[in-house]
């Protein structure tokens, strides 16, 4: 067994200080210096989203005032008492260093923040050494490439972020391995995995991680201390605050074949929904990870719980599901879902955005972390985005602005849909000689042959639409008609996508004319309100 890697003190979390300097800190320092830190700089967004869910319950354990603790169920009984305590914690301006030391120095947590502890490595299951074996009883690890998101695995794995192969795996620095450990637990795939044998029960299939293919939204303050305090979800917005709570490193290992423990606030809700089990294999000096086991942790049905950092969208059947991450969708297109009350919209905003201190709203931005994936094995792209200070526009604080944002977004989306349709029509007219070009002729589109103009037009349209959107939110533009700026952007995008046509290109000229006519129909008031 290699040397230890104590996450309390090892510099594994990249941050940017309020002075502008970049640094790396351990868990203890991230809390003692949270008021000096401006931002997290973890370069793997799914790891950052998971890390915040780990830091939030620790913040709840540490944040105190006058002997009252932030995660005390007695305080949580009354939301006003809890919010009052939060306000007193925020006004203190920093975490109490003694409270930080007391938590990370607890005897019952000895070794549990060590990435390579032989008995209880952080967020890992040491039983996998004996349970992930082949038919002859030899160790059957998954490979370090399986741990690192973005590396190819298997014989035909795609090369995405570097030339790595299973025949010549490259060790991972321990700090980076911690990021990918967290990312795997929250966003890991479903389907085939390294088999795990428990008694006579052996299977090699896992369920998807609790955040797979999702996007998370956090209120983002000018300093990490405020961000972490606000990241602690209200006890009234999640289940199980009356029941004693624990995070994985605070309790014994769960039995894989036993029922899943009840979800409690805030620890198990944020850190207790994993569907994967992981064990890292360190180098002799404990500075790198040379191999890893990744398998299933449970096949018991998961408890249904509202994640406090996700938007829920209404499905056709009337139920709600988390908004899926889309690497091509910019954050501004989600703003109305973050600002409007649930009852006024077909989306439910993240509970963590409720009950925010009014005095801080002008300073608060929104940070989004997303991972565009399918439900099983395919990973496309991850992203991080931060809005300007827009939470002052919440409907409860500024209803006029909240609904103006909704009108602007609705106009932009409708224009984008019409642009997509118009560009497809244009391609059909320009390339299919059997199309009737009379003004009133109906043109049937083939979804399998959209042509290149639609994608090219939308690629140009959405960045221009974002510029128009932020212009419309500037003072003096709140009463402006939302539709025309987006229509102008769409017409420009369409022209650029189709390109110039000479006199001989009569079908292209007619196609452009017909497509522009379809877009100009957006000038009708009913299309922009």
Image (cartoon, rainbow, N blue to C red):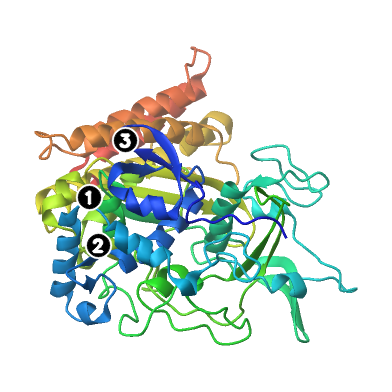
Numbered disc 1: secondary structure: helix
Marks 1 and 2, the one that precedes in the sequence: 2
CA distance for labels 3 and 2: 22 Å
Numbered disc 3: secondary structure: helix
Label for residue 456?
none
Circles 3 and 2: CB atoms closer than 8 Å: no
Q: Please report the residue visible at 52 percent of the width from the left and 33 percent of the height from the top.
A: 427
Circles 1 and 2: CB atoms closer than 8 Å: yes
Marks 3 and 2, the one that precedes in the sequence: 2
Where residue 277 appears, x then y in whole percent?
63, 69
* Residue at the disc numbered 2: 345
How many numbered marks have been drawn onto this rendered protein structure? 3
CA distance for labels 3 and 1: 14 Å
Q: Please report the residue visible at 19 percent of the width from the left and 61 percent of the height from the top.
A: 89
| Quarter in which the N terminus is drawn | bottom right
* Residue at the disc numbered 3: 466
Q: Residues within 10 Å of mark 3 (few under 14, many from 20)?
A: some
Of residue 461 and residue 302, the one placed in the foreground of this image is: 302
Label for residue 406?
1
């Amino acid at each position: 067994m290699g040397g230890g890697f104590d996450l309390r003190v090892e510099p594994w979390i990249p941050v940017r200080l309020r002075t502008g300097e970049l640094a790396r800190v351990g868990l203890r320092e991230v809390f003692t210096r949270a008021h000096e830190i401006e931002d997290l700089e973890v370069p793997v967004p799914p790891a950052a989203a998971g890390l915040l869910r780990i830091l939030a319950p620790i913040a709840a354990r540490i944040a105190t005032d006058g002997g009252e603790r932030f995660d005390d169920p007695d305080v949580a009984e009354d939301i006003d008492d809890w919010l009052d305590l939060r306000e007193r914690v925020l006004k203190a301006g920093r975490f109490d260093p003694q409270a930080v030391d007391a938590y990370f120095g607890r005897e019952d947590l000895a070794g549990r923040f060590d990435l390579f502890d032989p008995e209880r490595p952080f967020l890992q299951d040491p039983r996998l050494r004996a349970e992930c074996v082949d038919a002859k009883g030899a160790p059957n690890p998954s490979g370090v490439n399986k741990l690192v998101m973005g590396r190819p695995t298997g014989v035909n794995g795609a090369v995405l972020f570097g030339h790595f192969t299973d025949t010549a795996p490259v060790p991972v620095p321990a700090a980076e391995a911690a990021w990918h450990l967290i990312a795997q637990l929250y966003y890991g795939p479903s389907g085939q995995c390294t088999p795990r044998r428990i008694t006579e029960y052996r299977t090699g299939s896992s369920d998807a991680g609790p955040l797979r293919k999702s996007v998370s939204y956090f209120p983002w303050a000018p300093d990490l201390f405020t961000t972490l305090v606000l990241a602690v979800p209200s006890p009234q917005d999640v289940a199980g605050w009356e029941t004693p709570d624990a995070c994985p490193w605070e309790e014994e290992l769960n039995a894989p074949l036993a029922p899943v423990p009840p979800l409690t606030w805030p620890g198990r809700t944020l850190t207790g929904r994993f569907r994967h089990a992981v064990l890292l294999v360190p180098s002799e000096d404990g500075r790198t990870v040379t191999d890893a086991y990744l398998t299933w942790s449970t096949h018991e049905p998961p408890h249904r719980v509202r994640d406090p950092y996700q938007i829920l969208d209404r499905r056709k059947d009337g139920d709600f599901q988390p908004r899926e991450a889309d690497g091509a969708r910019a954050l501004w297109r989600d703003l109305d879902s973050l600002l409007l009350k649930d009852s006024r919209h077909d989306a439910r905003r993240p509970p963590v955005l409720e009950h925010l201190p009014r005095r801080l709203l002008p300073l608060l931005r929104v940070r989004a972390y997303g991972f565009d994936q399918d439900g099983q094995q395919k990973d496309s792209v991850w992203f991080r985005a931060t809005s300007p200070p827009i939470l002052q526009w919440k409907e409860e604080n500024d209803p006029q602005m909240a609904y103006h944002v909704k009108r602007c977004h609705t106009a932009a989306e409708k224009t984008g849909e019409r642009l997509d349709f118009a560009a497809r029509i244009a391609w059909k007219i320009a390339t299919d000689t059997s199309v009737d070009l009379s003004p009133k002729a109906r043109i049937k589109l083939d979804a399998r042959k959209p042509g290149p103009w639609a994608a090219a037009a939308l690629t140009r349209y959405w960045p221009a639409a974002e510029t128009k959107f932020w212009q419309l939110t500037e003072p003096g533009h709140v009463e402006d008609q939302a539709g025309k700026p987006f229509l102008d952007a769409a017409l420009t995008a369409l022209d650029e996508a189709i390109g110039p046509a000479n006199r001989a290109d009569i079908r292209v000229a007619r196609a452009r004319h017909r497509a522009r006519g379809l877009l100009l129909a957006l000038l009708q008031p009913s299309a922009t309100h």
